[in-house]
């Protein structure tokens, strides 16, 4: 996963499979975005996700809290049906809606 600067916002395009092995890379990428000395919005582009693990959901929710604490905007853009279904199955659909 790569952090890209796009017109003043930092974007991370999620791969098709965001599973347990991808959760550490996602965490590190989000920590890098948070550590940057900028007020840029951070956007997870999630339209291409075909499978998402509980570990990655936890990383996304922890990041949301971290960015909120830093008074920075964090959002999930165009979540795929796999993303919305994963959050719903975990009882976290309302949490995802706050990030869209």
Image: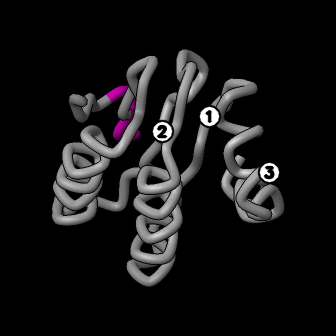
Give the residue drawn at x 36%, y 33%.
12
Which is nearer the N-term, disc 3 or disc 2? 2
Give the residue drawn at x 31%, y 48%.
23
Image quadrant holding the N terminus, namely top left
CA distance for labels 1 and 2: 6 Å
Give the residue drawn at x 43%, y 50%.
56
Residue bounds of the magenta highlight: 6-11
User: Which sits in the foreground, 56 or 47?
Assistant: 56
User: Which sits in the foreground, 34 or 90?
Assistant: 90
User: Which sits in the foreground, 73 or 76?
Assistant: 76
In this view, the residue farthest toward the bottom is 69
Q: Is residue 83 above or below residue 37?
A: above
Which is nearer the N-term, disc 1 or disc 3? 1
Left or right of 24 in this view: 84: right
Q: Is residue 83 above or below residue 95?
A: above
Left or right of 22 in this view: 14: right
Residue 44 visible (yes or no): yes
Q: Marks 1 and 3: which is nearer the front?
A: 3
Helix, strand or loop at label 3? It is helix
Q: Within 10 angstroms of label 1, few (less than 14), some, or many (20 or more) residues?
A: some
Tag 2 residue: 44
Give the residue drawn at x 22%, y 51%.
24
Residue 8 visible (yes or no): no
Confirm or deny contact between disc 1 and disc 2 (CB under 8 A): yes
Confirm or deny contact between disc 3 and disc 2 (CB under 8 A): no
Tag 1 residue: 77
Q: Within 10 angstroms of label 3, few (less than 14), some, or many (20 or more) residues?
A: some
Instruction: Kindly indicate the quadrant of the structure image that contains residue 62.
Output: bottom left
In the image, residue 16 lies at what x, y percent? 45, 18
């Amino acid at each position: 996963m790569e952090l890209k600067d796009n017109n003043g916002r930092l974007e991370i395009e999620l791969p098709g499979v965001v599973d347990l092995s991808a959760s550490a890379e996602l965490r590190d990428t989000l920590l890098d975005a948070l550590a940057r000395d900028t007020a840029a919005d951070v956007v997870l582009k999630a339209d291409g996700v075909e499978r998402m693990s509980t570990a990655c959901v936890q990383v996304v929710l922890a990041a949301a809290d971290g960015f909120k604490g830093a008074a920075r905007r964090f959002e999930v853009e165009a979540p795929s049906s796999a993303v919305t279904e994963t959050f719903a199955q975990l009882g976290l659909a309302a949490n995802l809606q706050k990030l869209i």
